[in-house]
Image (cartoon, grey):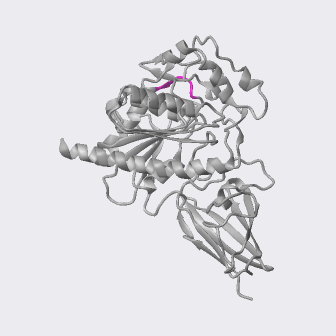
Amino acid sequence: MSEVMLSITPEDDLIDVPRRIVVSGATPGSGVAITATTLRAGGVTWQSQATFKADAQGTVDLTRDAPIAGDYAGVAAMGLVWSQAPVDSKSRDFFGETPSAPLTTTLAVQADGVVAQGAFVQRLAAEGVTRRDVRENGLVGTLFMPAGAGPHPAVVVLNGSGGGINEPRAALYASRGYAALALGYFKAPGLSDYISNTPLEYFKAGIDWVRAQVKPAHDFVAISGQSRGGELVLLLGATYPEAVSAVIAYVPGAVVHSGQNAADPAVGREGPTWLLDGKPIPHVWENNRTATWQPFDDGPAPHRHERAILTALQDPEAVARARIRVEAIQAPVMLLSATDDGSWPSSLYSQMVRDKLAEVSHPYPVSWLDYENGGHSILFPYLPTTQLVYAHPVSGKISTSGGNPTDNARADAESWAGVKQFLDDAVRARAAQSQSS
């Protein structure tokens, strides 16, 4: 009997690199079981399992073969990663709270009564990427710089209604050649615990700080935001068009929203989120004749925040007052959305933005990736996608982000590839414009 062997290529690389997992030496036609185990933050073990049928040469190749049983279906090279779930825990942690700490997944293969083992490492920060806390000019964030002297194009990274500082995405941007400032604006050291009454001038100061400190290649500073951050980057691009070189809006809103689940209780979830010149920016819940929280608050479990948002969109006058004037943006725009978004209708919102930009013949590229049956949590590749129900980090309300593990995993992988291409194209266009002027 030949020796059962496990091959993983590459064994150590960035998180956005898929791995080729191959088992060889099994009896042709026999069952081959593979268990993937990852020890994640807080000591919680995440695990998945799948069984395959060895081919006529006694091999199983996850880039080619679908499991005959297990935690995922269909051909998926990284299915053993995205189908992982916590063992004996309700944990819903995210990989990369400390981007410098790698994530190691161990694979155990059982075939012909033999156990073979191997492991691979996923990283957010490439070798040579540097991290710097930013606590100046009133800004609170973290700057990640790529390896090499530069200059590098830059991205400002903004989180959603969970607040905090999105270091994981900034580290990955830096690993792919972009100076990245993860800029906190609430639930970060020295800042408010709530999103209510956040001044847009703070973000303009952050963009200006990046230009002054990083001196980015071709003066290129993009803004990238998720969820409320997706709403925010569209709003910033429309408010400060001369400062923004590209807009990347993950699951965005097309209208300005109230504080919602991240609101200061003293202000209320129907109070303002954003200020400009000290004055609240009109939002869709304001003087809205149809808006009600009842479908979210009292709706069937798992609760969907999107149901309440849809009631607000039934008042066309309120929508018109709150619509983000995206036609003022003077830069390429990328939209990423999903049709089963449980938080708000990001697919409809992205269509609204795309249609308005088409109506005004927006003179820059507009890209839209819309994921059928995907949910609100479009992150980056090769993370577990099984935890769909969560407690909101501010309000504590239980709801679903929507989608399903398979389609969410596809959105994670394809969206990041699309974003990288979009940014590379935008930088090239900016460089060409700089050379011709």
Residue sitting at 33 percent across and 44 percent down?
213
- x and y percentages locating residue 165 in the rendered image: 53, 42
Extreme residue in the front direction: 56
Q: Is residue 266 visible?
A: no
Residue sitting at 42 percent across and 30 percent down?
236
Relative to 129, residue 280 above or below? above
- x and y percentages locating residue 25 in the rendered image: 69, 82
Query: Magenta residues: mostly which secondary structure?
Result: loop
Residue sitting at 30 percent across and 45 percent down?
429
- Report the side of 97 relative to 335 (left or right): right
- x and y percentages locating residue 1 in the rendered image: 75, 89
In what quadrant of the picture does the C terminus appear? Answer: top left
Magenta includes 15? Answer: no
Q: Is residue 22 visible?
A: yes
Magenta includes 198? Answer: yes
- 389 or 394, nearer to the observer: 389
Residue sitting at 43 percent across and 26 percent down?
356
Relative to 231, residue 405 above or below? below
Extreme residue in the left direction: 437
- 82 or 216, nearer to the observer: 82
- x and y percentages locating residue 78 in the rendered image: 62, 61
Image quadrant assignment for residue 286: top right
Magenta extent? 195-199
How many marks are shown on the rendered structure? 0
- 215 or 398, nearer to the observer: 398
